[in-house]
Image (tube, rainbow, N blue to C red):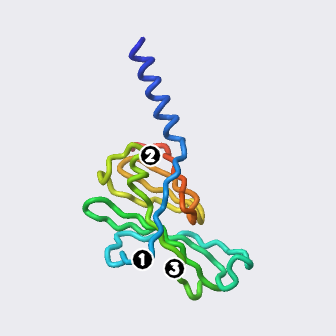
Amino acid sequence: MRQTAAGLLMLMSVSAAAGAFHTVRTLPREQADYYPWISFLSKGPAEKLPAEDAPLAYYRAFRVVVVQDPQQPLVFLEETVSGENGCCVRLASVAELDLVQLYAAFGLPEGGSEFRFIAWQSATAFTFSIGQRRFLLTDLGNLRVRIQERPPFSQP
């Protein structure tokens, strides 16, 4: 009976933790000097900007860039802006996702598993995995992003 209660309590605490959002900082970068080492890049859907916010740019899109360093992956979140019909794309900002803080928030071993992009969920949100664990990142474009663990991958 005690083993069953302890097991149930442990399962409930894991389930509660799996749904919690954690805020993780991004570290602004002066420039994107990592292009020769990119192992993955994905551009998300563009969103139209209000005219008063950007008189010379019409659309904003984010890119997720992964550099697989032997010690630990690096993940960069880029914001691009463009004119009408995708013309004149330029890099508006670059920030590095603080993986040390992400690993600590979710109890992940540092540098142990590869960061894998899964899919865009919206213009400012995407899913990714680290090892066998899956996550949702939201609030792209802010100094702090929100990350939530998602249900595990289904087993075949």
Query: Residue 148: x, y in percent?
Result: 52, 48
The reply to whether the C-beta atoms of the residues labelled 3 and 1 are less than 8 Å apart is yes
Please give the residue where the numbered disc 2 appears in the rendered image.
105
Q: CA distance from mark 3 to mark 2?
A: 30 Å
Query: Residue 27: x, y in percent?
Result: 46, 64
> Disc 1 marks which amino acid?
Ala
Q: Which residue corresponds to the image point at 54% horizontal and 41% vertical from the top-left?
A: 19
Q: CA distance from mark 1 to mark 2?
A: 27 Å
Please tell me which of labels 1 and 2 falls first in the chain. 1
Residue farthest to the right?
52
> Disc 2 marks which amino acid?
Ala
Q: Residue 90 versus residue 25: which sits nearer the camera?
A: 25
Residue 3 falls left or right of residue 124: left
Please give the residue where the numbered disc 3 appears in the rendered image.
91
Please tell me which of labels 3 and 1 falls first in the chain. 1
Query: Residue 51: x, y in percent?
Result: 73, 79
- Crowding near the residue tagged with mark 3, few <14, some 14–19, many ≥20 C-alpha atoms within 10 Å: some
Residue 140: quadrant of the picture:
bottom right
Residue 154: quadrant of the picture:
top left
Q: Which residue corresponds to the image point at 45% horizontal and 17% vertical from the top-left?
A: 5
Q: Which residue corresponds to the image point at 50% horizontal and 34% vertical from the top-left?
A: 15
From this view, report whether residue 146 is shown above or below residue 88: above
